[in-house]
Amino acid sequence: MDINHKIIDAIPTIAWCAQPGGANEFLNRRWRDYTGLSVEEGLGWGWKTAIHPDDLGRLTGKWQTLFAKGELGASEVRLRRSDGFYRWFLFQVEPLRDEAGRVVQWYGTATDIEDRKRAELLGAAEKRTLEMIGDGASLEGILDELCRSIEVQAPTTVSTVLLMAPDGKHLWHAAGRHVPRDWLPAISPLPIGPRAGCCGAAAFFKQRVIIADVATDPVWSDEHRQLALENGILAAWSQPILTQDREVLGTFALYAKGPRTPTDAELELIEGAGHIALIAIGRQRSQETLRKSEAELRRITDVIPQAIIVLAPDGRTLYANRVTLEYSGLNLEDVTSADFRQRVFHPDDLERVAAERQRLLSGEVPFELELRARRHDGKYRWFLIRYNPFRDEQGRVIRWYATGTDIDERKQAEERIRKENIALRDEIDRSSMFEEIVGSSDPLREVLSQIAKVAPTDSTVLIAGETGTGKELVARAIHAKSKRAGRAFVRVHCSAIPQALIASELFGHEKGAFTGALQRRIGRFESADGGTLFLDEVGELPTETQIALLRVLQEREFERVGSGQPIPLDVRVLAATNRDLEAAVASGSFRADLFYRLNVFPIAVPSLRERADDIPLLVEYLLQRSAKNAAKKINRIAKTTLDLFKAYSWPGNIRELQNVVERAVILCEGDTLAVDETWFKHVPSRSPDAESLYATLADQQREMIEAALRVSKGRVAGPFGAAAKLGIPRQTLDSKIAALGIDKSQFKT
């Protein structure tokens, strides 16, 4: 086996390669295992024996055309499994060309699409049923068509529909052209009872009945057992056709020619066929009851529990059903009046959709609009209005049918999310320490220059700086100057969210995703869609969340907790940290790939001691704001106070400065601001003995941390991590590991 064949053989799907003319030269192991064909049987054109006879001609014709033109292509066919059953597959082929452009080989794959195909065919059967009902077809014809559709999907079975007799005690055969003729007397009529075969028992118990072996199952009455076997009915499975009130209308059944239980696909077909039969029988019942009435169509719409309006081709209202009239409080005369729409729909919505509605009505294709409709009590509720055309035999639109679905709760939820985003933006604006960045020092000017350059782009920005330097202010400035300024700016403080909840907080969750998840919740990423997400203290994210964040940055999509459905995302990510992330990467507490994804455009925010020239301006700004909030008039700052401000190192940076000014304003009794020198912290220098003691303590800390890491095999977080064993927060332990230069990776096994 050459290297190409080995690669194809390792692919976890059915695959093959063929010669330029189309003859197969290699079929991989998945093909052979699935079809049961040997290597020799599948070579050349021998693989055709595994294709359904009804699909083979279409497939080979398509292939020959593709081979002749040298084009890639695809076709949907049924492929026989080793046990004889057929499943739908999507066959795809693509040519491999040499440097001259000549096809030297063909490569193909087959993807199982049975579930999708079955859903499509059931949907087509339901659509065909509704079309036949609309065309006035007989119930027998509709059910026969249903049986035919099901037998196409389950070719080794025979389907039948039995309907309830007027006495409510018997069933009569109503559809199924392939039911053996000699068997019909046994099921017309068929008494309902616990031992009356699969259909009689299904109607009796009002639940699905599976008879895997007619010859031995006690549910099958002895009276007709031998007759069933003689007619090739060796297994039977029946689904009762029940109304919402659990009234039995009949049964749908499949007969098999050998004793066996149904496959999952056949069970799905039985259930789907029962649902379609229920629609057909229910609709047919309504039509038969109302057929003699001149207002037949109108009365049919009245029994449907949904708002329905019948329109002329130009959009004039001709009729509204009972639900519509009851909701609006109008009568039929009001409905046909020229001002009907003005009386029912919100004026703002009418103006919004007027031109679009007229354009779509002339387009003759289904469409939908969202409008608010006035209830009889004067309250408006949101509705989704779906318009569907009804055509005559020549294909001309002679009516429009509009159905209204109440979506008020969904719209209210959307409005709540919109308001939450607005409130969140307002909260961030209110909670920030400045209305604008204050200062003119060289380090600050460098930061402002970087903001101006990166803001118009969508690049990810990593803002680094000590606590209290205004990293969030820088992030908001980037957002305000970006093209996303009109959209949400959502801040997430990563270290303030419990580790168990951070994934739900960031990505949201589905109802039932975990204990306490009583409803779907929108996460911060989804709230920020179209805008900016600011991840403050990103260095505190747990490893599991770092992986999920990396996927969002790479693929621009995420999944809610409890859901496997990816959601596309358009969010600009800004991150901030007061940690040395490069050191965290080196120690293994922060993923290197995530760091490089975040560090596209780094901005280092200077500490207040690095921009001491800005202190007078900052003090003046903060004084004005604090004095205004305290309703005081303070016009001057004592020189000694300003000197203290300039001389102090400000380990808490601007946040500490803000707090000191606010405290001074509260205590100020005149028009001059002054502070007490004792307010400022002074860090004493260490004596040689203290230095020695400090080194000893550091060594002890290192020994304790390394011992805990050794027991936990290098894991920091979690109930069995080193942090839990030492009884300290994970973030504290990460900081100490970085400060002491401990390599966690050496303890991992």
Image (cartoon, grey):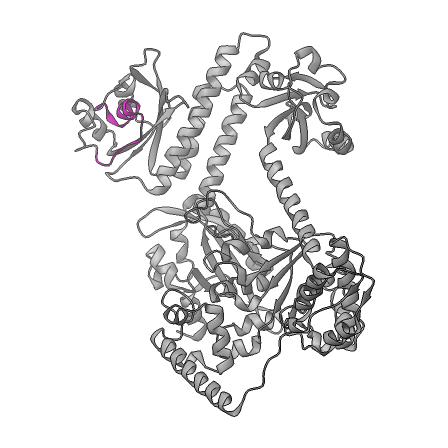
Is residue 465 among what the camera can see? no
* Quarter where residue 728 is shown: bottom left
Quadrant including the C terminus? bottom left
Quadrant including the N terminus? bottom left
The number of numbered badges drawn on the structure is 0
Closest to the observer, 507 or 734: 734
Closest to the observer, 156 or 116: 116
- Going by the image, does 215 lie left or right of 681? left
In the image, residue 574 sits, relative to residue 414, either above or below, namely below
- View extreme (bottom): residue: 688
Determine if the magenta segment contains residue 207: yes
| Residue at 38 percent of width and 33 percent of height | 271
Residue range of the region highlighted in magenta in the rendering: 195-213
Q: Position of residue 216 (x, y in %)?
A: 16, 33
Closest to the observer, 625 or 108: 625
Q: Position of residue 453 (x, y in %)?
A: 77, 69
Closest to the observer, 155 or 46: 155
Is residue 267 among what the camera can see? yes
Determine if the magenta segment contains residue 67: no
In the image, residue 685 sits, relative to residue 402, either above or below, namely below
- View extreme (front): residue: 669
Q: Position of residue 533 (x, y in %)?
A: 63, 58
Q: Position of residue 218 (x, y in %)?
A: 17, 29
In the image, residue 69 sits, relative to residue 618, either above or below, namely above
- Going by the image, does 42 lie left or right of 454? left
- Going by the image, does 625 lie left or right of 53? right
| Residue at 81 percent of width and 57 percent of height | 633
In the image, residue 492 sits, relative to residue 413, either above or below, namely below
